[in-house]
Amino acid sequence: SGRAKIVWSQLRDGRDPFEESSGLGHKARHALELAFSAQPPHSLLTSTVSACGTRKLLLRLRRGDEVEAVIIPQGAFSTLCVSSQVGCRQGCTFCATGTMGLLRSLAADEILAQLHAAAAAVRQHGMPPLRNVVFMGMGEPADNVEEVSRALHAMVHPFGFQLGRSYVCVSTVGPSPGHIRALEPLPARLAWSVHAADDRLRRLLVPTTRHRMSELRDAWGETLQARADRGLMAEVTLIDGVNDGADAAASLHGLLAPLPGKTRVNLIPYNANAGLGAAGRLFRPAQPEAVRAFQRRLLDRGLICTVRAPRGNEESSACGMLRVEHAKGSRASRGDLASSVSDEFKEADTARMQ
Protein backbone atom coordinates (compact mmCIF):
# COMPACT_ATOMS: atom_id res chain seq x y z
CA SER A 1 0.00 0.00 0.00
CA GLY A 2 0.99 3.64 -0.22
CA ARG A 3 1.38 3.87 3.56
CA ALA A 4 3.69 0.86 3.65
CA LYS A 5 5.82 2.44 0.92
CA ILE A 6 6.11 5.60 3.02
CA VAL A 7 7.23 3.57 6.03
CA TRP A 8 9.94 1.80 4.07
CA SER A 9 11.04 5.02 2.40
CA GLN A 10 11.58 6.45 5.88
CA LEU A 11 13.54 3.40 7.00
CA ARG A 12 15.74 3.44 3.87
CA ASP A 13 16.61 7.07 4.59
CA GLY A 14 17.50 6.33 8.20
CA ARG A 15 14.46 8.24 9.47
CA ASP A 16 11.79 7.40 12.04
CA PRO A 17 8.43 6.44 10.48
CA PHE A 18 6.71 7.11 13.83
CA GLU A 19 7.51 10.84 13.70
CA GLU A 20 4.87 13.36 12.60
CA SER A 21 7.13 14.48 9.75
CA SER A 22 7.16 10.98 8.25
CA GLY A 23 4.34 11.76 5.80
CA LEU A 24 1.91 9.35 7.46
CA GLY A 25 -1.41 10.64 8.72
CA HIS A 26 -2.37 10.53 12.39
CA LYS A 27 -4.52 7.40 12.01
CA ALA A 28 -1.79 5.54 10.12
CA ARG A 29 0.83 6.44 12.74
CA HIS A 30 -1.53 5.34 15.50
CA ALA A 31 -2.11 2.01 13.76
CA LEU A 32 1.65 1.62 13.38
CA GLU A 33 2.14 2.26 17.11
CA LEU A 34 -0.49 -0.35 17.99
CA ALA A 35 1.14 -2.99 15.76
CA PHE A 36 4.83 -2.32 16.37
CA SER A 37 7.14 -1.05 19.06
CA ALA A 38 8.10 2.59 18.55
CA GLN A 39 11.29 2.03 20.53
CA PRO A 40 14.22 1.68 18.09
CA PRO A 41 16.34 -1.46 18.46
CA HIS A 42 19.49 0.63 18.84
CA SER A 43 20.96 3.93 19.96
CA LEU A 44 24.06 5.55 18.52
CA LEU A 45 26.77 5.89 21.17
CA THR A 46 29.68 7.22 19.12
CA SER A 47 30.54 8.03 15.52
CA THR A 48 34.23 8.40 14.69
CA VAL A 49 35.75 9.25 11.34
CA SER A 50 39.19 8.45 9.89
CA ALA A 51 41.26 10.72 7.68
CA CYS A 52 40.14 8.72 4.62
CA GLY A 53 36.47 9.38 5.47
CA THR A 54 35.72 5.92 6.86
CA ARG A 55 33.17 6.27 9.66
CA LYS A 56 32.74 3.78 12.50
CA LEU A 57 29.43 3.60 14.38
CA LEU A 58 29.18 2.15 17.89
CA LEU A 59 25.60 1.09 18.53
CA ARG A 60 24.01 0.07 21.83
CA LEU A 61 21.28 -2.51 21.40
CA ARG A 62 18.10 -2.80 23.47
CA ARG A 63 19.56 -5.36 25.85
CA GLY A 64 22.53 -3.10 26.63
CA ASP A 65 25.31 -4.73 24.64
CA GLU A 66 27.12 -3.06 21.76
CA VAL A 67 28.19 -3.71 18.17
CA GLU A 68 30.18 -1.79 15.61
CA ALA A 69 29.42 -1.06 11.96
CA VAL A 70 31.67 0.76 9.49
CA ILE A 71 30.78 2.99 6.53
CA ILE A 72 33.47 3.17 3.84
CA PRO A 73 33.06 5.89 1.18
CA GLN A 74 34.27 4.75 -2.23
CA GLY A 75 33.89 7.51 -4.80
CA ALA A 76 30.25 7.79 -5.86
CA PHE A 77 28.94 5.26 -3.30
CA SER A 78 29.55 3.90 0.17
CA THR A 79 29.97 0.36 1.50
CA LEU A 80 28.61 -0.66 4.88
CA CYS A 81 30.33 -3.39 6.90
CA VAL A 82 27.83 -4.96 9.33
CA SER A 83 28.17 -7.28 12.30
CA SER A 84 26.17 -10.49 12.71
CA GLN A 85 27.15 -11.35 16.30
CA VAL A 86 28.41 -9.75 19.48
CA GLY A 87 31.89 -11.24 19.52
CA CYS A 88 32.83 -14.41 17.64
CA ARG A 89 33.64 -18.01 18.55
CA GLN A 90 36.05 -18.64 15.66
CA GLY A 91 38.99 -17.04 17.49
CA CYS A 92 41.07 -16.02 14.45
CA THR A 93 44.45 -15.16 15.94
CA PHE A 94 44.81 -11.96 13.88
CA CYS A 95 41.32 -10.57 14.64
CA ALA A 96 40.36 -8.37 17.60
CA THR A 97 36.75 -9.58 17.59
CA GLY A 98 37.98 -13.10 18.32
CA THR A 99 39.43 -11.96 21.65
CA MET A 100 35.87 -11.29 22.88
CA GLY A 101 34.65 -14.84 22.42
CA LEU A 102 31.04 -15.28 21.37
CA LEU A 103 28.55 -13.48 23.59
CA ARG A 104 25.46 -13.93 21.41
CA SER A 105 24.12 -13.84 17.89
CA LEU A 106 22.18 -10.84 16.64
CA ALA A 107 18.53 -11.00 15.65
CA ALA A 108 17.57 -9.87 12.15
CA ASP A 109 16.26 -6.52 13.37
CA GLU A 110 19.58 -5.83 15.12
CA ILE A 111 21.44 -6.45 11.86
CA LEU A 112 19.00 -4.21 9.99
CA ALA A 113 19.40 -1.56 12.71
CA GLN A 114 23.01 -1.13 11.55
CA LEU A 115 21.81 -0.41 8.02
CA HIS A 116 19.23 2.06 9.33
CA ALA A 117 21.84 3.84 11.48
CA ALA A 118 24.27 3.96 8.58
CA ALA A 119 21.63 5.45 6.27
CA ALA A 120 21.06 8.19 8.84
CA ALA A 121 24.80 8.85 9.16
CA VAL A 122 25.26 9.00 5.38
CA ARG A 123 22.45 11.54 5.10
CA GLN A 124 23.58 13.64 8.07
CA HIS A 125 27.25 13.79 7.08
CA GLY A 126 26.82 14.17 3.33
CA MET A 127 28.52 10.88 2.50
CA PRO A 128 28.03 9.05 -0.82
CA PRO A 129 24.85 6.93 -0.81
CA LEU A 130 24.98 3.37 0.46
CA ARG A 131 25.18 0.81 -2.34
CA ASN A 132 27.06 -2.16 -0.88
CA VAL A 133 26.64 -4.14 2.33
CA VAL A 134 29.24 -6.68 3.44
CA PHE A 135 28.89 -9.06 6.36
CA MET A 136 32.53 -8.66 7.38
CA GLY A 137 32.15 -7.00 10.77
CA MET A 138 31.95 -8.69 14.16
CA GLY A 139 30.87 -12.32 14.20
CA GLU A 140 30.64 -15.36 11.92
CA PRO A 141 27.53 -15.15 9.70
CA ALA A 142 27.44 -18.93 9.14
CA ASP A 143 26.98 -19.40 12.89
CA ASN A 144 23.85 -17.22 12.70
CA VAL A 145 22.55 -18.13 9.26
CA GLU A 146 18.82 -18.02 10.05
CA GLU A 147 18.86 -14.43 11.32
CA VAL A 148 21.34 -13.36 8.63
CA SER A 149 18.97 -14.81 6.02
CA ARG A 150 15.99 -12.91 7.44
CA ALA A 151 17.98 -9.66 7.39
CA LEU A 152 19.20 -10.27 3.84
CA HIS A 153 15.71 -10.76 2.47
CA ALA A 154 14.65 -7.39 3.91
CA MET A 155 17.79 -5.76 2.50
CA VAL A 156 17.29 -6.91 -1.08
CA HIS A 157 13.51 -6.92 -1.34
CA PRO A 158 12.12 -4.31 -3.79
CA PHE A 159 9.69 -3.11 -1.10
CA GLY A 160 12.37 -3.19 1.62
CA PHE A 161 15.82 -1.60 1.61
CA GLN A 162 16.05 -2.18 -2.17
CA LEU A 163 19.72 -3.23 -2.30
CA GLY A 164 20.91 -5.19 -5.32
CA ARG A 165 21.76 -8.81 -4.52
CA SER A 166 25.05 -8.48 -6.35
CA TYR A 167 25.99 -5.62 -4.02
CA VAL A 168 25.52 -7.62 -0.82
CA CYS A 169 28.22 -10.06 0.29
CA VAL A 170 28.36 -12.57 3.15
CA SER A 171 31.88 -13.54 4.24
CA THR A 172 32.56 -16.68 6.28
CA VAL A 173 35.49 -18.80 7.42
CA GLY A 174 33.35 -21.80 6.45
CA PRO A 175 33.31 -23.55 9.85
CA SER A 176 32.22 -26.88 8.34
CA PRO A 177 30.93 -28.35 5.08
CA GLY A 178 27.43 -28.22 6.57
CA HIS A 179 27.75 -24.55 7.41
CA ILE A 180 28.87 -23.83 3.84
CA ARG A 181 26.01 -25.76 2.24
CA ALA A 182 23.52 -23.89 4.46
CA LEU A 183 24.54 -20.65 2.71
CA GLU A 184 23.24 -21.86 -0.68
CA PRO A 185 19.83 -20.06 -0.59
CA LEU A 186 21.13 -16.70 0.68
CA PRO A 187 20.26 -13.78 -1.64
CA ALA A 188 23.81 -12.40 -1.65
CA ARG A 189 27.29 -13.02 -2.99
CA LEU A 190 29.47 -15.35 -0.93
CA ALA A 191 33.07 -14.97 0.21
CA TRP A 192 35.38 -17.48 1.89
CA SER A 193 37.90 -16.21 4.43
CA VAL A 194 40.64 -18.70 3.58
CA HIS A 195 43.79 -17.08 5.05
CA ALA A 196 45.85 -20.24 4.46
CA ALA A 197 45.46 -23.28 2.19
CA ASP A 198 47.81 -25.45 4.23
CA ASP A 199 45.83 -27.37 6.88
CA ARG A 200 48.33 -26.89 9.70
CA LEU A 201 48.77 -23.17 9.08
CA ARG A 202 45.01 -22.70 8.70
CA ARG A 203 44.48 -24.21 12.17
CA LEU A 204 47.07 -21.83 13.62
CA LEU A 205 45.35 -18.79 12.10
CA VAL A 206 41.77 -20.05 12.59
CA PRO A 207 42.02 -22.33 15.66
CA THR A 208 38.43 -23.58 15.39
CA THR A 209 39.16 -25.22 12.00
CA ARG A 210 38.05 -28.86 12.29
CA HIS A 211 38.05 -29.95 8.65
CA ARG A 212 40.66 -30.27 5.94
CA MET A 213 40.72 -27.35 3.55
CA SER A 214 40.01 -29.72 0.67
CA GLU A 215 36.78 -30.81 2.41
CA LEU A 216 35.68 -27.22 2.84
CA ARG A 217 36.67 -26.44 -0.76
CA ASP A 218 34.57 -29.32 -2.07
CA ALA A 219 31.57 -28.10 -0.08
CA TRP A 220 32.04 -24.70 -1.69
CA GLY A 221 32.11 -26.34 -5.10
CA GLU A 222 28.78 -28.07 -4.44
CA THR A 223 27.25 -24.87 -3.09
CA LEU A 224 28.39 -22.76 -6.03
CA GLN A 225 27.01 -25.29 -8.51
CA ALA A 226 23.67 -25.44 -6.69
CA ARG A 227 23.46 -21.64 -6.84
CA ALA A 228 24.60 -21.47 -10.49
CA ASP A 229 27.00 -18.92 -9.03
CA ARG A 230 29.38 -16.91 -11.18
CA GLY A 231 32.24 -17.57 -8.76
CA LEU A 232 33.53 -17.31 -5.22
CA MET A 233 35.44 -14.49 -3.55
CA ALA A 234 38.36 -15.87 -1.53
CA GLU A 235 39.94 -13.61 1.11
CA VAL A 236 43.44 -13.90 2.54
CA THR A 237 44.85 -11.74 5.33
CA LEU A 238 48.58 -11.54 4.57
CA ILE A 239 50.91 -11.57 7.59
CA ASP A 240 54.62 -10.93 7.26
CA GLY A 241 56.59 -14.19 7.24
CA VAL A 242 53.54 -16.28 8.08
CA ASN A 243 51.42 -16.79 4.95
CA ASP A 244 52.81 -14.34 2.39
CA GLY A 245 55.44 -16.49 0.66
CA ALA A 246 55.70 -18.29 -2.66
CA ASP A 247 54.70 -21.67 -1.20
CA ALA A 248 51.56 -20.15 0.36
CA ALA A 249 50.59 -18.64 -2.99
CA ALA A 250 51.12 -21.94 -4.81
CA SER A 251 49.08 -23.84 -2.18
CA LEU A 252 46.28 -21.30 -2.42
CA HIS A 253 46.10 -21.69 -6.19
CA GLY A 254 46.05 -25.47 -5.85
CA LEU A 255 43.18 -25.24 -3.36
CA LEU A 256 41.04 -22.83 -5.36
CA ALA A 257 41.69 -23.97 -8.94
CA PRO A 258 39.03 -26.76 -8.97
CA LEU A 259 36.19 -24.41 -7.96
CA PRO A 260 33.56 -23.68 -10.62
CA GLY A 261 33.17 -20.20 -12.09
CA LYS A 262 35.65 -17.36 -11.81
CA THR A 263 37.28 -17.34 -8.39
CA ARG A 264 38.41 -13.91 -7.25
CA VAL A 265 41.09 -13.58 -4.57
CA ASN A 266 41.15 -10.49 -2.39
CA LEU A 267 44.42 -9.97 -0.52
CA ILE A 268 44.13 -8.05 2.75
CA PRO A 269 47.41 -6.81 4.26
CA TYR A 270 47.18 -7.52 7.99
CA ASN A 271 46.24 -4.46 10.06
CA ALA A 272 48.63 -4.09 13.01
CA ASN A 273 46.44 -4.61 16.05
CA ALA A 274 47.59 -3.92 19.61
CA GLY A 275 44.36 -5.43 20.94
CA LEU A 276 45.56 -8.97 20.22
CA GLY A 277 48.04 -9.17 23.08
CA ALA A 278 50.97 -11.51 22.46
CA ALA A 279 49.84 -12.43 18.94
CA GLY A 280 49.41 -8.78 18.07
CA ARG A 281 52.99 -8.08 19.09
CA LEU A 282 54.28 -10.91 16.90
CA PHE A 283 52.24 -10.28 13.77
CA ARG A 284 53.29 -7.65 11.26
CA PRO A 285 51.61 -6.53 8.01
CA ALA A 286 53.03 -8.21 4.93
CA GLN A 287 55.51 -5.93 3.18
CA PRO A 288 54.17 -4.15 0.05
CA GLU A 289 56.66 -5.98 -2.17
CA ALA A 290 55.57 -9.32 -0.70
CA VAL A 291 51.91 -8.48 -1.34
CA ARG A 292 52.66 -7.53 -4.95
CA ALA A 293 54.67 -10.73 -5.47
CA PHE A 294 51.87 -12.84 -3.98
CA GLN A 295 49.36 -11.16 -6.27
CA ARG A 296 51.57 -11.65 -9.31
CA ARG A 297 51.98 -15.38 -8.59
CA LEU A 298 48.21 -15.83 -8.51
CA LEU A 299 47.65 -13.71 -11.61
CA ASP A 300 50.28 -15.71 -13.49
CA ARG A 301 48.36 -18.88 -12.59
CA GLY A 302 45.13 -17.49 -14.02
CA LEU A 303 43.32 -16.35 -10.86
CA ILE A 304 41.73 -12.92 -10.60
CA CYS A 305 43.49 -11.23 -7.68
CA THR A 306 43.06 -7.79 -6.11
CA VAL A 307 44.57 -6.09 -3.05
CA ARG A 308 42.32 -4.37 -0.55
CA ALA A 309 43.50 -0.88 0.35
CA PRO A 310 43.62 -0.32 4.14
CA ARG A 311 40.82 1.98 5.33
CA GLY A 312 40.14 3.33 8.82
CA ASN A 313 43.21 1.92 10.56
CA GLU A 314 43.77 4.91 12.82
CA GLU A 315 40.25 4.62 14.27
CA SER A 316 40.43 0.81 14.58
CA SER A 317 37.80 0.58 11.85
CA ALA A 318 39.73 -1.64 9.45
CA CYS A 319 39.38 -5.37 8.80
CA GLY A 320 40.11 -7.44 11.92
CA MET A 321 40.08 -4.45 14.29
CA LEU A 322 36.45 -4.35 15.51
CA ARG A 323 35.99 -5.00 19.21
CA VAL A 324 33.71 -3.61 21.93
CA GLU A 325 34.23 -3.50 25.68
CA HIS A 326 30.63 -3.73 26.87
CA ALA A 327 28.47 -6.70 25.97
CA LYS A 328 25.87 -7.88 28.43
CA GLY A 329 22.17 -8.71 28.79
CA SER A 330 19.68 -11.05 27.13
CA ARG A 331 18.50 -11.54 23.58
CA ALA A 332 16.57 -8.55 22.25
CA SER A 333 12.83 -8.59 21.60
CA ARG A 334 11.74 -9.06 18.01
CA GLY A 335 8.48 -7.11 18.20
CA ASP A 336 9.71 -4.35 15.93
CA LEU A 337 8.77 -3.28 12.43
CA ALA A 338 11.83 -4.33 10.42
CA SER A 339 12.11 -7.76 12.02
CA SER A 340 8.44 -8.60 11.49
CA VAL A 341 8.36 -7.78 7.81
CA SER A 342 11.69 -9.45 7.05
CA ASP A 343 9.95 -12.82 7.44
CA GLU A 344 7.32 -11.76 4.90
CA PHE A 345 10.05 -10.69 2.47
CA LYS A 346 11.83 -14.03 2.88
CA GLU A 347 8.61 -15.95 2.16
CA ALA A 348 7.87 -13.79 -0.89
CA ASP A 349 11.38 -14.30 -2.29
CA THR A 350 11.15 -18.04 -1.73
CA ALA A 351 7.83 -18.20 -3.54
CA ARG A 352 9.25 -16.26 -6.51
CA MET A 353 12.15 -18.72 -6.87
CA GLN A 354 9.89 -21.79 -6.89
Image (cartoon, rainbow, N blue to C red):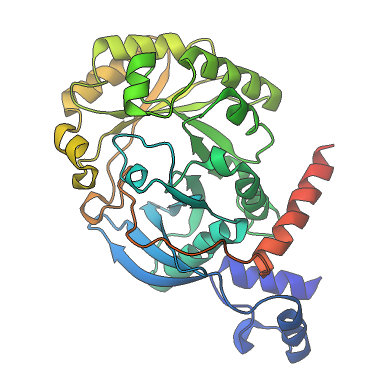
Relative placement, left or right, of 201 versus 336 is: left
Residue 291 seen by the camera = yes
Relative placement, left or right, of 6 versus 64 is: right
Identified at 30% across, 20% down, the residue is 295
Image x and y of residue 12, in percent:
59, 65
63 to 232, vertically: above or below: below
> Looking at the image, which is closer to me, 315 or 156?
315
Relative placement, left or right, of 353 versus 103 is: right
Q: State the quadrant of the N terminus.
A: bottom right
Most extreme residue toward the front is: 329
Q: How many marks?
A: 0
Identified at 50% across, 61% down, the residue is 114
Q: State the quadrant of the C terminus.
A: top right
> Looking at the image, which is closer to me, 210 or 126?
210
Relative placement, left or right, of 74 versus 340 is: left
325 to 198, vertically: above or below: below
> Looking at the image, which is closer to me, 64 or 244?
64
Image x and y of residue 85, in percent:
49, 50
Identified at 34% across, 9% down, the residue is 250
Residue 123 seen by the camera = no
> Looking at the image, which is closer to me, 158 or 100?
100
Image x and y of residue 55, in percent:
34, 60
226 to 274, vertically: above or below: above
Identified at 23% across, 47% down, the residue is 275
Image x and y of residue 91, in percent:
37, 37
